[in-house]
Amino acid sequence: MDNTDFSKPRALKPVLGIETSCDETGVAVVRWEPEAPGRGLLAHNVYSQIKLHADYGGVVPELASRDHVRKLLPLVRRTLADAGLGLEDLGGVAYTAGPGLVGALLVGACAGRALAWGLGVPALGVHHMEGHLLAPLLEDDPPQPPFVALLVSGGHSMLVAVEAIGAYRILGDTLDDAAGEAFDKTAKMMGLPYPGGPMLAKLAEQGTPGRFHFARPMTDRPGLDFSFSGLKTQVLLAWQASDHSEQTCKDVACGFEEAIVATLIIKCRRALRAAGATRLVIAGGVSANRRLRRELAVAAEQDGFRVYFPRPAFCTDNGAMIALAGAIRLASGQHQDATVPVYPRWDLQSLPAA
Ligand code: KG4
Ligand code: ZN
């Protein structure tokens, strides 16, 4: 083991970020630039496993792990080349340590840990949802805490009060299906191929607003938790009773998307009031949704809050958000010893201050 003292704040050398929590292999190099984090993004690449899982209608964990093994190191090599850097230029390595599929996480964690060991630089396991939450910092005019974050991905729908980087209080959480999961499952029910969520959203864009009206779950009572599994059943019943025409498919998709978006916006408004915040950050795969982005901009105008999104490529899983979160924490002297802990579940609120 090397005997370098990694506990002191480090000179801000570039950090390699590795994301392998699910079905995307993401790699990026980021140097932490507190004034303008986006300027510190030196290169990033994502390899998507969509084709691999398409035949099965969903992610097959074992196949995901094996494919990360195949793709990760070539992607690291390509990303370093894109950044014009060699391994010797890295000041640290960050990898997603959870939440996610354990086998898939282990691929990135082992490779990242071993690389850091070999290079004699610190390594750090990053919380995937903290990565999503910080992704909007990579854009121009980044949000300053305090803010409220809506994290909407395939595994989570969460509202989080962010006092500072690392100081997170969960205001509302998923009770059953997450928003992205509801998109994916509804798409599958309607016979759309995997990955259904983005395709359902595309069809919804061409649908007739208002032809199908679905309930906005749990908005008729106080609280900030989310439940989307009942909505999925409502949509199924409407779809089964319909003529299954192409236009009806688009109209049902539109009604479904309207219900999800309206529900998310009602809860965001409530969360902003509850936290006394005037800034809202939206991140995670569903934050790529165009209706959500459009309608939130209108709500922000009406209520006088500001809304911040990552670019679409940084809404879904990517290495840049992991490199950024890792670079911030490594710069403050945080690091992990030579173990490789990964967590299928991991409470965001248990993270230390950055
Ligand atoms: O953050 P992400 O890439 O992976 C997880 O951490 O889960 O999110 C993936 C989720 C999927 O459920 C996918 O259907 C959803 O994000 N998604 C979308 C859109 N693009 C991706 N949902 C609605 N509209 C979109 N445009
Ligand atoms: Zn994600």
Image (spheres, rainbow, N blue to C red):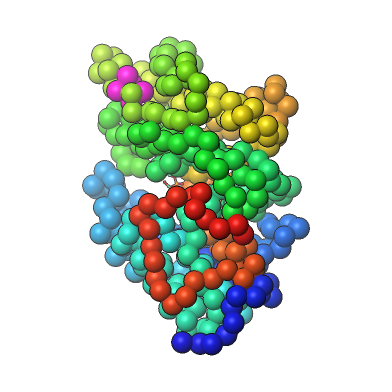
From this viewpoint, which residue is outermost toward the right? Answer: 35
**Corner quadrant of residue 190:** top left
Q: In the rendered view, tell whether residue 310 sits above or below residue 323.
A: above
Q: Is residue 233 magenta?
A: yes
| Residue at 68 percent of width and 34 percent of height | 277
| Residue at 47 percent of width and 84 percent of height | 118
Q: Nearer the viewer, residue 176 or 321?
A: 176
From the top left corner, tell me how far across and down residue 233 is, in percent: 29, 23
Q: Main secondary structure of the magenta part?
A: helix
Left or right: 353, with 119 as reference point:
right
From the top left corner, tell me how far across and down residue 158 is, in percent: 49, 38
Number of marks in the rendered image:
0
Left or right: 276, with 349 as reference point:
right
* First to last magenta residue range: 231-235
From the top left corner, tell me how far across and down residue 165 is, in percent: 63, 53
- Residue 165 appears in the picture as rendered: yes
From the top left corner, tell me how far across and down residue 249 is, in percent: 35, 22
- Residue 255 appears in the picture as rendered: no
Left or right: 303, with 210 as reference point:
right
| Residue at 38 percent of width and 20 percent of height | 252
**Corner quadrant of residue 33:** bottom right
Q: Nearer the viewer, residue 300 or 78?
A: 300
Q: Is residue 133 magenta?
A: no
| Residue at 51 percent of width and 49 percent of height | 349
The C terminus appears in which quarter of the rendering? bottom right
